[in-house]
Amino acid sequence: MPGRVLSASFCLLALPACLAIAAEPSWPDEHWEVSTPAREGLDEEAILALDAELRSGKHGYVDSMLIARHGRIVFEARYPRDYKAINAGRMTGESGPWNYYDATWHPYYQGTDLHTMQSTTKSVMSALVGIAIARGDLPGTDATLGALLPHRKIADPAKAAITLENILTMRPGFEWLEDQVSYWDPRNDGIRVERTDDWVGYLLRKPLVAPQGTTYNYNSTNTQLMSEIVSNATGKPLDRYAEELLFHPIGIRDYHWKSAPEGYRDAAGGLYLRSRDLARLALLYERKGEWNGRQVIPADWVERSIQPHVKDTNPDDPDDDVGYGYQWWVFNDGSDGRPAMVGTWGWGGQHGLIVPDLGIIAVFTGWNVYEDVESEYAFKLFYDRIIAGIAP
């Protein structure tokens, strides 16, 4: 089937020797090494059962699944969908990059295999902040908005005092309605801001309703602050900075990155990548920022990024205890005795997932944005069906 990899090779050595070989890490160059679930200690039947369900559409519009262990791809599949036909009865308004029913832009970029990352872009933004701090391009996470965006002339001293630390952890204190309502709801600030010609200006005009550092509130334009901060500090467009210091060192060569109206790259959700390139980013974090002998991101930044600075992003729901780090999600912190899992989360089902103690990464892309289509979170399916039964 197109895009599916499941090697038919078998390990002919004795089991202990086979597992020892499998545990040796592999580093992708232009291509990835391919293995089998069994050789890498994964349940092939469970993977194939999930694959069959995704292919059938049982879990909504999932576009791809990739699983790798020890740096080797053990499973890869794409699930083609005709989004032009799917959106035919939904498309309204102007075509363009902010119309999420426009199949020219969503979920694939203009007929290519570059898939929208949506808020997975935020995790890439976090990586670039860590790189910028390590290089001395930014002073550190205690730096304030007033110092980082002097051209904005932020008059409110409380807003000017907001730290980069609290921007990274979604705790700046702004009034903001996004995660609490549907993205199709006209009240949603994440959508309203896209109709303006200055996203950061829209955010800075919002009142503060909580002291910084006290209240988690998901806010996409909060991340856009960092695009402007890094671009101004380095004197380079964000994508060029990313190419030089993040993308090219780990082998990402092709991407698209939309710009916000004020001219800075859209760090809230504007990046498009191929699944294997999102897998490179996940592998980089699984390897603590190292890529084949080169420390691309400082190891301590990776560690700080995937810690649950916010222990529970939805305390009102006892069944939802996902934590939040530096623009990375903590899906399971390991405190329940099961394997910890962290990763990215983009609207529609864009996930780069990492199970650090097991050396496993996974990538899902999708377009589960339709309110009239039943779907399940891909990260939860992956954890419950593939990971939960593996001993840490």
Image (cartoon, grey):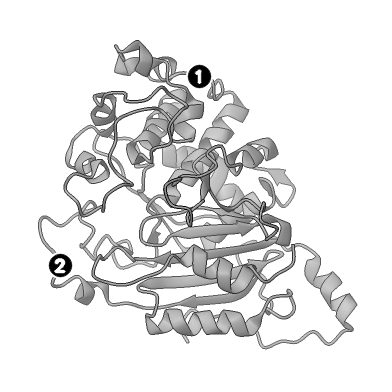
Q: Residue at x 36, y 36 (%)?
A: 224
Residue at image position (41%, 68%) is 376
Q: Is residue 66 visible?
A: yes
Neighbours of disc 1 within 10 Å: few (<14), some (14-19), many (20+): some
Q: Amino acid at mark 1?
A: Ala
Q: Using the numbered discs, state the Cα–Cα distance from disc 1 to disc 2 in whole angstroms.
A: 44 Å
Tally of numbered discs? 2
Q: Quadrant of the C terminus?
A: bottom right
Is residue 373 toward the left or the right of residue 331 in the image?
A: left
Circle 2 — which element?
A: loop
Between 1 and 354, the residue placed more toward the observer is 354
- Find residue 90 and name its label: 2
When the figure is inspected, residue 88 is found, relative to residue 56, above or below; the finding is above
Compare marks 1 and 2 and give the one earlier in the sequence.
2
User: In the rendering, at what x and y percent does residue 252 appear?
Assistant: 53, 55
**Residue on which disc 1 sits:** 143
Disc 1 is placed on an element classified as: loop
> Is 44 drawn above or below residue 184 in the view shown?
below
Q: Residue furthest left?
A: 93
The amino acid type found where label 2 is placed reads Arg
Residue at x 35%, y 72% (from the top left corner): 61
Mark 2 residue crowding within 10 angstroms, few (<14) / some (14–19) / many (20+): few
- In x, y percent, where is residue 90? 15, 67
